[in-house]
Image (cartoon, grey):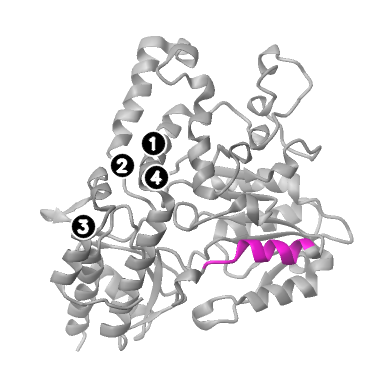
């Protein structure tokens, strides 16, 4: 993208013309010494929507006034509460409503999905993943391989990065699937690699894996609410994600899960729970588990109302803003930050994240050229200035200009702060 200018006036004019600018006022921006922070950490924990407090207090009021009867007579009856986020969640991830459910946390959902979709045999014992995956994924996949009596040394296959900054090319993924596919029971890859910010082509990965007879699941923790997704059309067997990053549902919020509709009534192994039972007969309390068709059939327990209320409030913001509009602004904001860094800080920072907007979301991962110690020093300096990103070992600073509440002026302010730090290092 071209036409950018590195001036305060230009950045402010872009913010004034932004059709999504009013949404920033719907979030609590943390203060820093009498002014607002420049918050670039929505990829780790999204800011609190102002509508959350009223949403939670409404459920507290129903609890205090109605107690158990709020399941049926509340303003939003609790019996069906998880269904209130279903349609919007499905829109955000590009799925059919019956293919998604909000439940548990990401790690729990990943294990539940592998109970159903990692079914290793002597001939096909392996899981294929990326090297350097987020620890939750690495721990979960390794533990599942061990649980089934196989050896992670041979049956947890990690695709090594082969691109600039530790990125992973599609050619490397294709080669790994071609080489190992005959032994692979399940492919598990991210939508966005957490450290590099690289986006993966989900549909292409599914096509390659299915041609080799592999099932496919995705961890979309850094992709949901960030990228245009089409989970149903991708053909993935399952996907899991958290909702406290770009979806702004709060720390440790209820996670999300996708199960493709071809598995809606499939007789697959699963860990069963009462709330996953067919809701038309759930309260008959019978001993025989009959799963609800679709993703709801993987639920274990009744929904956590006080944890779902913030997600419901946040998804309302997404409905009004519209994912296409958010993605369009995100690409322009991230491109502006990318351009500023390359044009003004090229001697100080290396950008790890791909330059192609189609291969990244609202995240730029950078390394300080002077090394890890200098990187830690810069990160600490930015915190002192009220500029909040995050650090990922061994040497990456992540900055995520999130379209719901970040501005062009924020991007310029962050770069000016890094320039000021550079001046102290001379």
- Circle 2 SS class: loop
Q: Sequence order check: which comes first, mark 1 or mark 2?
A: 2
Q: Distance of mark 4 from mark 1, alpha carbons?
A: 13 Å
Q: Distance of mark 4 from mark 3, alpha carbons?
A: 23 Å
- Circle 4 SS class: helix
Q: Sequence order check: which comes first, mark 3 or mark 1?
A: 3
Tell whether 19 sits left or right of 9: right
Residue in the picture at 64% in, 61% down: 203
In the image, which residues are magenta?
199-210
- Circle 3 SS class: loop
Q: Quadrant of the C terminus?
A: bottom left
Residue 72 visible, this angle: yes
Residue 61 lies in what quarter of the image? top left
Tag 1–tag 2 contact (CB < 8 Å): yes
Within-10-Å neighbours for mark 3: few <14, some 14–19, many 20+: some
Residue receiving disc 2: 49
Residue in the picture at 50% in, 71% down: 359
In the image, residue 340 sits, relative to residue 235, either above or below, namely: below
Q: Distance of mark 2 from mark 4, alpha carbons?
A: 11 Å
Tell me where residue 226 appears, x and y as whole percent: 44, 56
Look at discs 2 and 4 and give the one toward the viewer: 4
Residue receiving disc 4: 318
Residue 235 lies in what quarter of the image? bottom right
Report the predominant secondary structure element of the magenta stretch: helix
Look at discs 2 and 3 and give the one toward the viewer: 2
Residue receiving disc 1: 310
Tell me where residue 321 appears, x and y as whole percent: 36, 47
């Amino acid at each position: 993208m071209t036409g950018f200018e590195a001036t305060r006036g230009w950045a402010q004019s872009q913010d004034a013309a932004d059709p999504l600018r009013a949404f920033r006022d719907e979030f609590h921006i943390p203060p820093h010494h009498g002014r607002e922070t420049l918050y670039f950490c929505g990829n780790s924990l999204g800011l609190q929507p102002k509508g959350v407090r009223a949403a939670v207090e409404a459920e507290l009021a129903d609890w205090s006034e109605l107690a158990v009867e709020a399941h049926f007579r509340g303003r939003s009856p609790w019996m069906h509460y998880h269904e209130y986020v279903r349609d919007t969640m499905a829109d955000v991830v590009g799925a059919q409503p019956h293919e998604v459910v909000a439940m548990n946390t990401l790690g729990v959902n990943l294990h539940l999905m592998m109970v159903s979709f990692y079914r290793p045999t002597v001939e096909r014992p392996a899981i294929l993943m990326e090297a350097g995956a987020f620890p939750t994924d690495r721990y979960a996949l390794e533990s599942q391989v061990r649980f089934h009596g196989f050896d992670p040394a041979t049956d947890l296959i990690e695709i090594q990065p082969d691109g600039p900054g530790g990125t992973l090319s599609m050619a490397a993924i294709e080669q790994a699937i071609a080489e190992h596919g005959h032994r692979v029971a399940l492919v598990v890859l991210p939508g966005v690699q957490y450290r590099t910010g690289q986006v993966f082509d989900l549909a292409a990965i599914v096509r390659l894996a299915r041609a080799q007879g592999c099932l496919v699941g995705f961890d979309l923790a850094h992709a949901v609410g960030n990228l245009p997704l089409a989970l149903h059309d991708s053909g993935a067997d399952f996907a899991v994600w958290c909702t406290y990053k770009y979806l702004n549902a709060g720390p440790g919020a209820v996670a999300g899960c996708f199960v493709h509709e071809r598995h809606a009534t499939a007789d697959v192994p699963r860990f069963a729970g009462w709330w996953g039972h067919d809701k038309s007969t759930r309260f008959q309390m019978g001993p025989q588990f009959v799963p609800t068709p679709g993703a709801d059939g993987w639920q274990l327990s009744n929904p956590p109302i006080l944890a779902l209320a913030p997600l419901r409030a946040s998804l309302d913001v997404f409905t009004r803003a519209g994912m296409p509009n958010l993605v369009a602004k995100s690409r322009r904001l991230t491109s502006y930050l990318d351009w500023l860094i390359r044009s003004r800080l090229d001697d100080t920072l290396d950008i790890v994240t791909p330059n192609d907007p189609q291969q990244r979301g609202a995240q730029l991962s950078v390394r300080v050229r002077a090394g890890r110690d200098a990187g830690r020093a810069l990160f600490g300096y930015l915190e002192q200035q009220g500029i909040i990103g995050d650090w990922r070992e061994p040497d990456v600073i992540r900055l995520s200009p999130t379209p719901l509440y970040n501005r062009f002026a924020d991007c310029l302010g962050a770069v000016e702060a890094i320039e000021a730090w550079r001046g102290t290092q001379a």
